[in-house]
Image (tube, grey):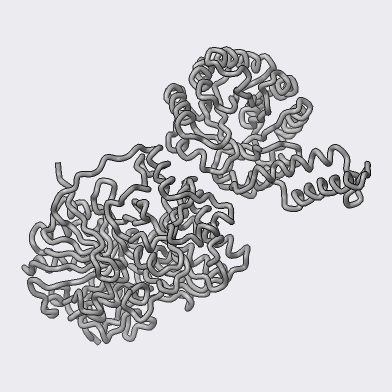
Amino acid sequence: MNGKLVKDLKEAIRLSGLEDGMTISFHHHLRNGDMVAVMVMEAICEMGIRNLNVNISSIFDTHEPFIGYIEDGVITGIETNYMGGVVGRAISEGLLDKPVIFRTHGGRPSDIISGKSPIDVAFIAAPTSDCMGNCTGKIGKSACGSLGYAFADAMYAGKSVVITDNLAEYPLVDYSIAENYIDYVVVVDKIGEPSGIVSGTTKITKDPVGLVIADYAARAIDASGLLVDGFSFQTGAGGASLAAAKYLKDIMLRKGVQGSYGLGGITSYMVDMMQSGCFKALYDVQCFDLDAIASLRTNPNHMEVTAAHYASPTAKSSAVDSLDVVILGATEIDTNFNVNVHTDSNGYIMGGSGGHSDTAAGAKMSMIVAPLSRARLPIVVDQVMCKSTPGHTVDVLVTQRGIAVNPLRGDLRDRFLDAGLPVFDIHELRDMAEKLNGKPKMLTRGDREVAKVIYRDGTLLDTIYNVPVR
Amino acid sequence: MRRSMLFFPGNSANMLLNADFLGSDSMILDLEDAVAPTEKDSARILVRNAIRDLGYTREVIVRINPVDSPYWEKDLQTIIPVKPDMIMPTKVSCADDVKIISDYIAGLEEQLGMEVGTVKLIPLIETALGVENAYQIASSDPRVEAIFLGGEDLTADLRCKRTKEGNEIFYARSRMVMAARAAGVDVYDTPWTDVEDYEGLIKDAEFAKSLGFTGKSSISPRHVTFINEVFSPTEEEIQYARDVFATIEKAKAEGKGVVSLRGKMIDAPIVARAAQVLEAAEAMKGGR
């Protein structure tokens, strides 16, 4: 049975009807091990198709060859939720004429589904697929776990092409994306480099400052009044966030709190929390390590969710809406609690919202964990260089020196003080950071728009300008 | 109150920057073993600037180089002007070692217009001779507020292996506690050196506490919480101490002379112990 198999990538591209000026899409579940996006771009380039808009859920450093395709005019537009430092640097220096469109993990599927950002051809890397396009990330040599970010692409693109390196017999059981959305299936030797797709196991930080922050974060959650039966939780995969999850687990087990669900990008620590009885279920939009993939494959309470189910602001409901607490990072936070996760201290793009602003908006308490300073630069500042997440959705900042609470959340402030936690005004934390590090000189930015940060509701949140090249 | 003392390498700017936030009751900023000879000058300046500019809220102890090294005078000249709470002299083997340092500090205090005796001492005893002279050291000078056992150097001097069980330092520990208590000063235990072995750390700290140590030092920030827990009074101890004072108050009001609590007569040692517990409980409030 050949089903929808076509002989190679170029054949699939030809059959899809891809032409100059169209929009193509990719997902980022293979993370820094992804070989598919570059492989597809190479075929497209050889076929002479140009002027494409690329909608990719995240760009990693492995996508460096995009820079060449932009220079050659093959790629002329980029829409994404996150951009790593390598491509980010080139974009910041003015590589692309049209500003990059940054969305959130929830905003992207929302705009795809509503037709605001239509996709002509979706290219879906799938660690395992049958010949009709029933596919999954749970098994295969390039297993990545959840395919959460790829669903909207597969379901709403004009044409959808599955690219796999593990062809399974039809019908594939326990598929993620179903054949009714798929037009063509292409088998290639290798879709990704396993070492770049997931880490073996995620490790909590050993940095003593990170551990102090994590300890305060866990104690603040304990004091928030939200840590009761039915508690739901999301945390990032950064060292301090994971350490906070570990401390939180200890508190939950000690107090016998039975939570409802853990959400988000899932790590071995969240799996461990579920297995220890802290949560009944995990809603998994993306797996970060091998333990998470194994759990998703074997534990029926560990469920794959689509990006729209995870965080779409226009869905009838999404999982972030029921979230109690989320722990998030920041490259900068200002005294109005606005957070920057897009640019570094020199103004270069090196990140993106991902689910940051979605979860901050949805959760009953959104908590930023960050050291007071990094590499002699204050993290608490007067005004962030880029507003990635608006301050009114950010409730708490936890640093090694103490905790600042958004004035909108006087209730939390009182609870933290009652628990004996070191609570400061955020201006005090800014002053401490400046006293230690001095006040950095204002950056001179260029006057060319290189990216637009679109909030989850579709409004323009901020504009990123070019960094002048000396 | 000092339950925990955490060592920080004097040449690590990042560690010094965050030293105040890591939960230990005292911070020992090290100019001695953690700092290579080529780094001595820069560490001295860094530690001085850190104490001067960072506004530390916890007790600051600076560990200086031994009196037989070419560094200790320069260490004191640089550090005393920023008024650390205490100086930790190293390889202290007899009362004279303390006198030399105390006199030198007195000279500096006079020059700087400080009250003589402002800066206290916590001699590090880490030689066989030092252990044998522990009482003389502990009672050698009014600056001495505590003595401190260094297990690693001591076992090298004893020509035996340092083990997790610690049988080889049992005598030294007991002798140190006896000497300190006889001299009326505090006494601090050597660090637990296996950073990852928390169970071993807790056992070791509990043993030190059972011998009479006031607290324990650490080379890892991750050990601090455990040490603080071991050396903090328990809820029951705090309640008992409160009951002791409540009973005394009641007896006073009723004009009784001798009182008992839970079938035991409340005598001076029990009152003293209860006062220590309440003082410790008060000092712990809101801290980590």
* Residue at 58%, 61% in the rendered image: A251
Vertical comparison of A354 with A162: above or below:
above
Camera-side residue of A237 and A34: A237
Q: Is residue B258 visible?
A: yes
Q: Position of residue A211 (x, y in %)?
A: 50, 50
Q: Quadrant of the N terminus of chain B?
A: top right
Camera-side residue of A298 and A180: A180
* Residue at 40%, 37% in the rendered image: A436
| Quadrant of the rendered image containing residue A330 | bottom left
| Quadrant of the rendered image containing residue A225 | bottom right
Vertical comparison of B98 with B21: above or below:
above
B214 sits left or right of B103 in the view? right
Q: Position of residue A335 (x, y in %)?
A: 37, 51
| Quadrant of the rendered image containing residue B231 | top right
Q: Position of residue B204 (x, y in %)?
A: 68, 43
> Most extreme residue toward the left, as rendered?
A48
* Residue at 54%, 73% in the rendered image: A230
Camera-side residue of A344 and B69: A344
* Residue at 31%, 83% in the rendered image: A178
Mark count: 0
Vertical comparison of A56 with A185: above or below:
above
B187 sits left or right of A202 in the view? right
Q: Is residue A247 visible?
A: no
Vertical comparison of B31 with A364: above or below:
above
